Amino acid sequence: MSGHSKWNNIKRKKEATDAAKGKIFTKIGREITVCVKESGPDPNNNAKLRDLIAKAKSNNVPNDNIERVIKKAAGGGDKNNYENMVYEGYGPNGVAVIVECLTDNKNRTAGDVRHYFDKFGGNLGTSGCVSFMFSKKGIVIVENNNIDEDVIMEDAFEFGADDLSVEEEAVEISCEPSELGNLREGLTSKGYNVLSAEIDQIPSNYTTLTDEEHIKKMNLLLEHLEDNDDVQNVYHNWEMNE
């Protein structure tokens, strides 16, 4: 998986503070709410809901919380009407950034996102200005507990994988987005510990930052975007030094 590693992002989420965990719960809950309203509360008939429940559990969201959100959305208890919004722009030194949001107030969200870009050395662009540099992939992260590389390769490809990368702590497996649920469930059935299974946006090329001020501002841009409750996902092509 040439040059791309999601595992370090997953680790950061796992090690998040309680406040940050609360934000993660809120964001996933909002995704579940929209999914239930669109396609129903039964995960057996709603593949996307199955994926979101698995995502919630991998982020240590308690089962009671998950069930409460589903029941509230199914029963019409959540009156918020969230809309999907996608913003594209550039961070310092031309780093490409995609921001996916679920919002009940487009004006507020657009203003916040534009403010972050302006404040931290970037600029918000028009729709399509950077998305052509990214392709959507399903990314499954499996714990590496002395896994045999040949065995997991065979198992992963059986369930629709198209590439994998073995790291010291985890195995990162990619697939087409439509195969994500099948791959996650298949590997789980084989006894693998799936740490994460999500759709990701993979950049076709990367931008390196060497100026300390650029690095500082890029980190601040990402922190402020990820801290905003309306922002669900942030993708970029900054080649970060881990």
Image: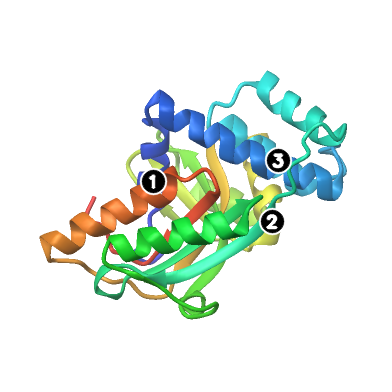
Residue type at mark 3 is Ile
| Earlier-in-chain disc, 2 versus 1 | 1
**Horizontal and vertical percent position of residue 145:** 42, 32
**Residue that mark 3 sits on:** 32
| Earlier-in-chain disc, 3 versus 2 | 3
Name the quadrant of the N terminus.
bottom left
**Horizontal and vertical percent position of residue 65:** 67, 23
State the residue at coordinates (63%, 53%): 105
Query: Does the CB distance between marks 3 and 1 fall below 8 Å?
Result: no
Foreground label between 2 and 1: 2
Foreground label between 3 and 2: 2
Q: How far is mark 3 from mark 1, CA to CA?
A: 22 Å
Q: How is the image coloured?
A: rainbow
- Residue 89 occupies which quadrant of the picture? bottom left
| Earlier-in-chain disc, 3 versus 1 | 1
**Residue that mark 1 sits on:** 9
Query: Does the CB distance between marks 2 and 1 fall below 8 Å?
Result: no
Q: Is residue 95 left or right of residue 27?
A: left
Q: Secondary structure at mark 1?
A: helix
Residue type at mark 2 is Glu
Q: Secondary structure at mark 3?
A: helix
**Residue that mark 2 sits on:** 83
Q: Is residue 194 left or right of residue 240?
A: right
State the residue at coordinates (75%, 25%): 67
Residue placed most toward the observer, 62 or 71: 71
